[in-house]
Image (spheres, grey):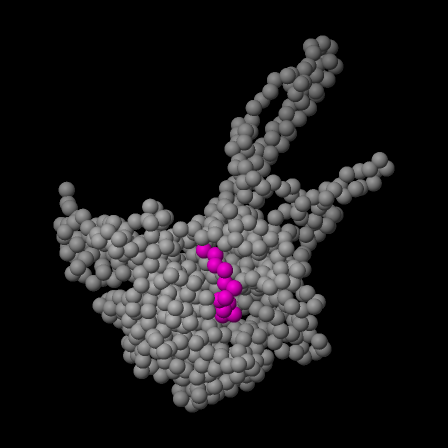
Amino acid sequence: MADLLDLPAEIIVRILCYLDLADLASAIQVNSTLRTYFKTFQILQYRFALQAAGVEDNPHSDLVVAERLERLKSQEEGWAQFRFDFRKRIPVRHVPSGIYDMTGGIYLLGDASKRTLHYCTLPSKADDAAEWKRINIDRRLVDMGLSIYEHDLIAIVTTTPHQTHLGLSVIEILLLQFSTGKPHPLARQPVLHVTESRWPRPAIGIEIVGDHLALVTNYFLHHDRPDDHFYIFEWKTGTLKMDVSADNHTYSGIVFLSPSLVLLPNTREKTLDVWSIPDAPLPSSAAPTTTTTPGQPPALPAPPPRPFLALSLPPIAHSQLLLTLSCRGEPNPTLSGTTPFSRHPFHPAPNDALVIFNMRLQHLGFARGSTFSMFVKRSALLEWAGDALARIERRRRRKERRRERERERERETERESRERDRGVMQAVGEREAGETERWEDPSVSGEEVETEGETEDEEDEEGDEDGTWPGHIRWDLPHGMMLVALDAHGQPIPIPVRPPPHAEVCVPWEDWGPPVTRLFDAEDMPTRWITTSAGERCVVSSEDAAGMGLQEMDVEEEETERPPLKVLDFNYLRVRRAMAQLQREMDEGDGGLEGIPEPGARMKEMLAGDVIVDRGPSGGRTQREVVTAPSVIQHEAFEEPVQTALPYVSLACWPPRGERFDFAGVLMDEERLLGLRTDEEDAIVEIEVMHMGSGVDNQSGRDGSQMQADKVPEEEKAGETHPWYGVEQTVY
């Protein structure tokens, strides 16, 4: 029998490249030949490092494997040690507005005129130029969405007065190629009509993944309380696939879980609603349609679309109002799984990326409000979505089997009826012929016939039929119908019936949330900016960051006056590695890969509060803590204490003596931190890039957006106006 090791080394290495991290680690530990291959072939080391870092290779990068591996090692070391390989200050020369984004190596900032977007390609090396560019629009901006790495696309939401109807505003979306500022070449309709509204400027949430553009519009603070709307467009064809209307103060943000699944935080129901994007357009819920057949009564309107899954938030106290519920998950998934407009060698894996939910609550007695930040991985949300879809499919199959049994019973009844009719006719004929034999109706013979599968429904899961989680019961009726009783005079009396849940499957917080989330009291954290995560890391900056999960006894008195920056890392392998490092510190053992304990095991009680204190490479003091034990938040905002247990490592870094991290807020992407400095009026006046590890080479590893922009002729860079949509892109 042929042995695996008899194959050529190149084939063996190719096979090993398809193993996951645990299997690859086992293989190289138990076999010396495979271990030699691992040390010899950098592609194996690179595959190993990719999985350990929670990132995915980008096949569109020009770098060879050795360069990719070196960049990955350098970047991971930078994050692990809080090492800045360079810092660069970039002044903001315009008066900014509240419009901003940071994605795809781009920082974008609106201005007070509401007609211009300013953006800067963030440097990856110390000698990279950092210049501001701008896109001018001839209409009023509302907000924008970016898909830099997947489509080189910017979608700008605008509002203009209606040309013929006074008091109406037209809301549209401009689809532009980001690198050129021109209409996107893949968009059949470069201007998408959204709606006509009596309210000119909604607050919006917008995300673009694959062929779909998702848009949420709301007017939370408007005194007329108009409905919220949720739209799904196929942006390449201009097809509107979903238009869902909801009560005011329901939806405001959106996160893609996959190219076909979107999550919308529901402020009114206090849930995370997951919707499935249909293959074909759905009728608008704002104007339900009915079908009428001649000679038949009008059909009942179709039920409005609803999410297939609702994950409840921690129960909020009755004395509290949930004011806002914002969300963010970076990076977005992609349809093809690749990023064709990026030349960076790797990117964080979207499925493992953190999703942040910022909750702002207000006591109804007008006391001081409270803010909380909740972190959960996209993969956990996807797992619950998959379970719900499987549950719905099982229910559909059971209903189909039940309908088939009912149809079979009807057919059997018809056959029995025909048999009875034939028997009656035969008996009548026999009596007429003088026969006196008695005929008996088989239906009253006292014999019972058991139908095959009749007891199959007894195996149904409890609670599954009504769309709620086990233990929750409801009484559902077809949409548009009500239950009535008759009084003594025969007049109908409506019977109140609890309406069906707003989702097909509803899951209470205690069934899903505690093991897969981590909740923080964010009262002293700046939640004005939500672009604070990339992959499985997030950044925390506040005056109270020194005490947020860190051992206060280890913080020097002088350094409590210089608040640190802190990065939380939820990668489970890095959590295990940090735990193993703490274990080695305790018992002076070797602690190889095979000895790394699982989070939540015996190490939890032993190491949950232990820290490593060091003088960091960037000149300031660093402090690392492994947090695997559950945390409990006891706050008047919640009905009961809230326990969450998603493991993480926190790394805090204080600035060198004599310096301060004087930032109003800190953003992050996969390469860098971005500090924001503001003036007395809280307007951003300067940004500071703090780059982690080695950057992408300017020649062979530039971001696709910069690479594409370099191809634009200088006369176009200097400013070109396109009259039909009034867009001008300039460099200054």
Image quarter of the N terminus: top left
- Total labels drawn: 0
Q: Residue 662 at what x, y percent from top left?
A: 43, 76
Q: Which residue is pictured at 47% across the width and 61% down the height?
A: 356
Q: Residue drawn 53% across and 81% down?
A: 680
Q: Is residue 33 visible?
A: yes
Position of the C terminus, as image quadrant, is bottom left
Let me know if residue 330 is in the magenta part: no
Where on the picture, by quarter, is residue 240? bottom right
Res. 536 in view = no
**Vertical placement of residue 319 versus 473, above or below:** below
Q: Residue 663: x and y, percent? A: 44, 75
Residue in the image at 73% along x and 10% along y: 434
Residue 522: in magenta span: yes
Q: Main secondary structure of the magenta part?
A: loop
Q: Quadrant of residue 661?
A: bottom left
Name the side, left or right, on which 483 lies relative to 347.
Answer: right
Q: Quadrant of residue 115?
A: bottom right
Q: Is residue 164 above or below residue 521?
A: below
Residue pushed farthest right?
489
Region of the chain picked out in magenta, as a range: 518-536
Q: Looking at the picture, tell me which residue is in the foreground, 257 or 518.
A: 518
Front-most of residues 341 and 270 = 270
* 124 sits to left or right of 667: left
